[in-house]
Amino acid sequence: MKVVLPVAGAGMHLRPHTYTHPKPLIPIAGKPLLSHIVDDLIQAGFSEFIFVLGYLSEKVRSYLLSTYEGRVTLHFVLQEPRQGLAHAIYLTKDHFPHGEPLLIVLGDTLLQVEWEPIRSSPHTLVGVAPVSTPSAFGIAEVGENGQVLRLVEKPLIPRSNQALVGLYKIQDTLALFEAIAYLLEHRLTSHGEYQLTDALDRMVQQGIPIYALPVRYWLDCERKEALLEANRMLLDKNPPPLPTEYPHTVLIPPVYVPPSCKLYRTIIGPYVSLGEGVEIQNAVIQNSIIGAYSRVRNLLLRESVIGGDSFLVGRESALNLGENTVMEL
């Protein structure tokens, strides 16, 4: 089964990081977000991937080729202009000439699922999970037997709290592409884009059965807070070994520290991921991601995402205070 990974978006909510760096390549727990997704799929036995590229496409393509070429089969499709997820999926239709099933996984979403039951299911499946703000998501209305009754993109008055989490197993691929073609032909957009949710809902209304697949854990890495949560989750899942070559530094696991880092009189952790060549001196770093070749000195950092090649310097003070003194620096 081929896997389609749409990675064309500009990552507006993660600026300024995505001005020069594509969102799928933002590093988390020692490697880019996209690699966590692809490596999980490869481990599950998937070997052919179609990437829908767009924003900063050459950077994404170059990384994927240098990392995965020869290990799996890679295909690339360019989405320009970017007109929504349904439009992105429609651009891959030539890779499915016989209507064979396909798997869609969004390239900025981390999931914890059992892949084999999804692959072997004879039905079209959409991953769902309950949310507290359903009006911000595509929503599935689900019947008692798990069959989807209706799908709506970001409804003003939600009739369900079951959000679409970015996982779709399509059994009837020809029907999906026909539904998307109908949207494109009649210019039927929602929220300014051609939505995959609307195409799937058209299939439901045509009587094509689609079933909800409850997902135990998912994380849409669209904002800084989600990146840090993903970093914590991945470090907990696979704690990296602690390096021992930093005698004047305290490492509080779990942390990811490449051998090329230089640390001196520093406290790192918990839940910190450092990029290659990072230099930190006289600092305390907690629950943060520091990009490659950045330098940090004389700072206390918490809940931070620092891009690569950054230079942060705080103030170092020498004080001589008498009794009953209160000072805030």
Image (tube, grey):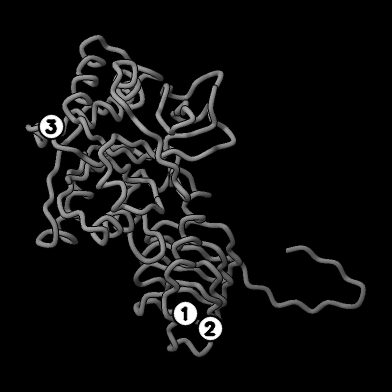
From what the image shows, is residue 196 above or below residue 108? above
Q: Earlier in the sequence, mark 3 or mark 1?
A: 3
Q: Would you say the residues marked 2 and 1 are in contact, meaning their CB atoms lie under 8 Å apart?
A: yes
Extreme residue in the front direction: 145
Dot 1, crowdedness within 10 Å: few (<14), some or many (≥20)?
many
Q: Position of residue 5 (x, y in %)?
A: 25, 43
Q: Which structural element holds mark 3?
A: loop
Residue at 46% in and 52% down: 227
Q: Name the foreground residue: 230 vs 81.
A: 230
- Give the residue type at disc 3: Gly
From what the image shows, is residue 179 above or below residue 266? above
> Which quadrant holds the C terminus?
bottom right
- Give the residue type at disc 1: Leu
Separation of disc 2 and disc 1 at Cα? Answer: 7 Å
Extreme residue in the top direction: 186
Q: Would you say the residues marked 3 and 1 are in contact, meaning their CB atoms lie under 8 Å apart?
A: no
44 sits left or right of 23 in the view: left
Q: Earlier in the sequence, mark 2 or mark 1?
A: 2
Q: From the image, tell me which residue sits under label 1.
A: 263
Q: Position of residue 103 (x, y in %)?
A: 25, 42
Separation of disc 3 and disc 2 at Cα? Answer: 57 Å
Name the front one of labels 3 and 1: 3
Q: From the image, tell me which residue sits under label 3.
A: 99
Residue 249: which numbered mark, if any? 2
Residue at 50% in and 33% down: 162
Using the rendered image of the protein, determine whether residue 66 is visible from the camera's viewpoint: yes
